[in-house]
Image (cartoon, rainbow, N blue to C red):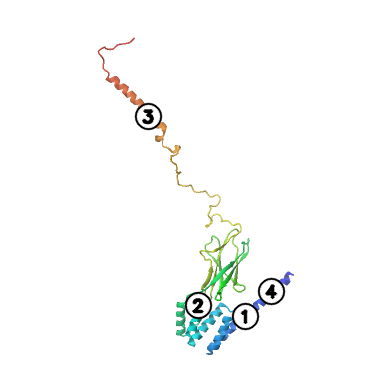
């Protein structure tokens, strides 16, 4: 049964792919016809073919840009400057970094486009919605998906930039276009217990960034289940186990210095001894002085038995 399912699934993929190729081929055929008519000086018919490219939802961003460029050049050739200006603005809204593909255009065309580009004010409205797993698997890969909404006709590619939390550089992954405006990339899982940081960019064919979700300095984080900062990592806010806490240099704020740290000359017993010595010395000195100053009286000395 599983083999039958795989065969059926493979057949469906081939059918869908063939439809996509046919649709892309229609846009390519209309674009080729427009170029051929332009070289044959059949300008109005060329514009009709190029408009068919713009009306084709399967046309790629690069095909749309080429069709708009040729249409603007045709309008200039027919002296329709206002329509040429409008067409160039449509082109720049899809890709503000677009450069003319043919350096052999007449100087008037190149100058007109340069002026339109200088006066252009971007009006791009692209939003990116992430679709990521709820948990990081233990090993293998995980799928990151970006869904583009808004005016995304100029989006040519989407990129995912990923790194393990704590790393300084990102790895770039070109995302696969799935269905419509959905892009997916399979990226390696980070080491067990480590978070994954990522951000998305969508670009025009020129490489101009049309939209971004997060950035290299402000990434999104996919948190590992039960993750904790690895010991000693640069992003750990607590010291690893077994690390001694450095002693503080601050002294306790107390009104009285601890007794064990008092110097000896500030203790009570020292000043008690000093006081006693001073009193004793004073008394002895007074007694000696009195004996030396007494003179014999008129009654003489009386010896007691």
Which residue is at a point 36% across and 26% down the rendered structure image?
279
Give the numbered dot on residue 92. Answer: 2
Contact between marks 4 and 2 (CB within 8 A): the answer is: no
> Which of the 4 image quadrants contains residue 225?
bottom right
Crowding at mark 2 (Cα within 10 Å: few <14, some 14-19, many 20+): many
Whole-number angstrom distance, CA of label 4 to CA of label 2: 40 Å
Q: Residues within 10 Å of mark 4 (few under 14, many from 20)?
A: few
Say which label, 3 or 1, has the lower sequence index.
Answer: 1
Q: Position of residue 79 (x, y in %)?
A: 47, 87
Circle 4 residue = 10
Discs 3/4, front:
3
Asked if residue 235 is positioned above or below residue 275 in the image, the reply reads: below
| Image location (x, y in percent) of residue 268 | 41, 32
Task: Name the residue that disc number 3 marks.
Answer: 275
As measured in the structure, the alpha-carbon distance from the residue carrying label 3 to the one carrying label 1 is 114 Å
**Image quadrant containing the N terminus:** bottom right
């Amino acid at each position: 049964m599983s083999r039958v399912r795989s065969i059926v699934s493979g057949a469906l993929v081939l059918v869908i792919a063939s439809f996509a190729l046919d649709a892309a081929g229609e846009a390519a055929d209309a674009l080729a016809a427009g170029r051929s008519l332009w070289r044959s000086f059949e300008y109005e018919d060329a514009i009709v073919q190029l408009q068919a490219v713009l009306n084709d939802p399967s046309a790629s961003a690069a095909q749309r840009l080429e069709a708009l460029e040729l249409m603007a050049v045709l309008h200039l050739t027919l002296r329709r400057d206002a329509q040429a200006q409008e067409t160039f603005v449509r082109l720049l809204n899809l890709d503000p970094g677009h450069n003319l593909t043919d350096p052999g255009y007449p100087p008037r065309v190149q100058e007109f486009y340069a002026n339109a580009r200088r006066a252009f004010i971007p009006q791009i409205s692209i939003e990116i919605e992430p679709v990521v797993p709820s948990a990081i698997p233990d090993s293998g890969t995980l799928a990151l998906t970006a869904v583009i909404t808004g005016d995304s006709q100029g989006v040519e590619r989407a990129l995912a930039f990923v790194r393990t939390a704590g790393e300084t550089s990102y790895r770039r992954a070109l995302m696969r276009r799935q269905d419509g405006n959905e892009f997916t990339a399979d990226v390696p899982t980070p080491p067990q217990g480590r978070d994954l940081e990522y951000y998305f960019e969508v670009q025009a064919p020129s490489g101009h960034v049309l939209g971004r979700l997060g950035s290299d300095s402000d990434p999104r984080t996919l948190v590992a289940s039960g993750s904790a900062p690895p010991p000693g990592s640069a992003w750990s806010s607590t010291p690893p186990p077994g690390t001694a806490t450095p002693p503080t240099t601050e002294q306790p704020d107390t009104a009285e210095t601890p007794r064990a740290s008092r110097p000896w000359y500030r203790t009570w017993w020292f000043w008690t001894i000093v006081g006693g010595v001073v009193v004793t010395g004073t008394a002895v000195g007074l007694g000696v002085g009195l004996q030396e100053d007494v003179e014999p009286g008129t009654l003489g000395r009386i010896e007691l038995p």
